[in-house]
Amino acid sequence: MTEGGSVVGLTFDASFAWPVYDWMGVAKAAFESTSRYLARDLGPDGIRCNLVSAGPIRTTAAKSIPGFSSMEDGWPERAPLGWDQTDPEPTARAVAALLSDWFPATTGEIVHVDGGVHAMGL
């Protein structure tokens, strides 16, 4: 990336200790911190580093998390915008937007694509 660019990763909000997420939550917290440090260190080279925190999506990776279904249960009802666990498109659109030049001054961010659950509290 000699002329700037963008790095985007996927996370699941590590600011909470989610039930059944266990070791993956700890790994995501480290990943979120790493992204902030990369934003700091790569910013002078014009490289943006951001994350997308998606709500639960039924993926191959999700199948390897014991009890994942208990985490996704009730998510659509808690989300002000609703949530479809089978539709990865909203998350993919956020990633594509962050990779594009539409966010030229955004780095070190975590964009929540979760139907609004992150803002609702318990």
Image (spheres, helix red, strand yellow):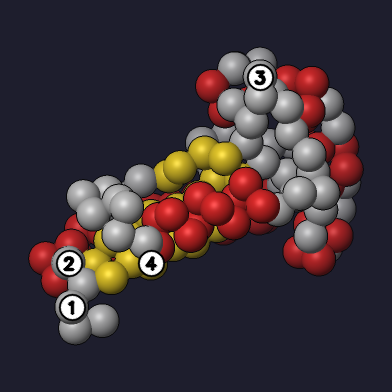
Which of the marked residues, 4 or 2, is nearer the chain's N terminus?
4
The image shows residue 44 at horizontal and vertical percentages of 11, 65
Q: In this rendered view, identify the residue nearer to me: 33 or 75.
A: 75
Tell me if mark 1 has few (under 14), some (14-19) or many (20+) residues whose alpha carbon lies within 10 angstroms of its own.
Answer: few
Which of the marked residues, 3 or 1, is nearer the chain's N terminus?
1
CB atoms of marks 2 and 3 within 8 Å:
no
Which of the marked residues, 4 or 3, is nearer the chain's N terminus?
4
Tell me if mark 3 has few (under 14), some (14-19) or many (20+) residues whose alpha carbon lies within 10 angstroms of its own.
Answer: some
The image shows residue 114 at horizontal and vertical percentages of 62, 36
* Left-right relation of 8 to 39: right
- Residue mark closest to the camera, 4 vs 3: 3
Tell me if mark 2 has few (under 14), some (14-19) or many (20+) residues whose alpha carbon lies within 10 angstroms of its own.
Answer: some
Name the amino acid, label 1.
Glu
Residue on which the image places disc 3: 80
- Residue mark closest to the camera, 4 vs 1: 1
* Left-right relation of 109 to 106: right
Which of the marked residues, 2 or 3, is nearer the chain's N terminus?
2
Name the amino acid, label 2.
Gly
**Element under label 3?**
loop
CB atoms of marks 4 and 1 within 8 Å:
no
Name the amino acid, label 3.
Pro
**Element under label 2?**
loop
Residue name at image x 74 percent, y 34 percent: 83
Residue on which the image places disc 4: 7
Residue on which the image places disc 2: 46
Mark drawn on residue 3: 1
Disc 2 versus disc 1: distance between alpha carbons? 7 Å
Residue name at image x 55 percent, y 46 percent: 53
* Left-right relation of 101 to 112: left
